[in-house]
Image (cartoon, helix red, strand yellow):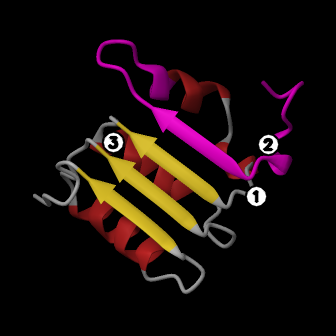
Amino acid sequence: MYRFFPPETVVGLSLMGFAGYHTIELFLSRVDIRQFIRLRSLAISNVSDSNLNTILRQITTSSLTSLSISSLMIESEDTAALLSSIIAQTNLEELNMTDDCYELY
């Protein structure tokens, strides 16, 4: 992936998990998400609370203007706090949260 799309040039990223395939874990183990410094749009779907927490901790949020999260459960207070922090940013212009992601435990 790095040969074709250097992370520092990527402005949009969609991460989708598939049950039983550990696609998000594989992506996170091979890609340093902190290198996506120009990321403006992030879509996350079907990820575990643990993976969402990792993504939210590592993502450069200063340039993020659009965030979409669907089909997940936020199970930890830490993940909820990270998400709240990103939502509170003034540069976030678009937020889409669907399915069960609004159920905080």
Residue 59 makes an appearance in the image: no
Element assignment for label 2:
helix
**Residue 20 location (% of width, % of height):** 31, 13
Q: Is residue 70 above or below residue 30?
A: below
Element assignment for label 3:
helix
The residue that disc 2 covers is 7
| Between discs 1 and 3, the one toward the N terminus | 1
Residue 81 makes an appearance in the image: yes
**Residue 70 location (% of width, % of height):** 32, 46
Residue depicted at 89% across the width and 24% down the height:
3
10 Å neighbourhood of mark 3: few (<14), some, or many (≥20)?
some
| Between discs 2 and 1, the one toward the N terminus | 2
Relative to 65, 52 lies left or right = left
**Residue 61 location (% of width, % of height):** 61, 67
**Residue 73 location (% of width, % of height):** 20, 47
Mark 2 in CB contact with mark 3 (< 8 angstroms): no
How many numbered dots are placed on residues in this image? Answer: 3
Q: Does the stretch in magenta take in 94?
A: no
**Position of the C terminus by quadrant:** bottom left
Residue depicted at 37% across the width and 51% down the height:
69
The residue that disc 1 covers is 37
Three-letter amino acid code of the residue under disc 2: Pro
The one nearer the camera, 65 or 47, is 65
Picture quarter containing residue 96?
A: bottom left
Three-letter amino acid code of the residue under disc 1: Ile
Mark 2 in CB contact with mark 1 (< 8 angstroms): yes
Three-letter amino acid code of the residue under disc 3: Ser
| Between discs 2 and 3, the one toward the N terminus | 2
Look at the image and give the residue range highlighted in magenta. Answer: 1-25
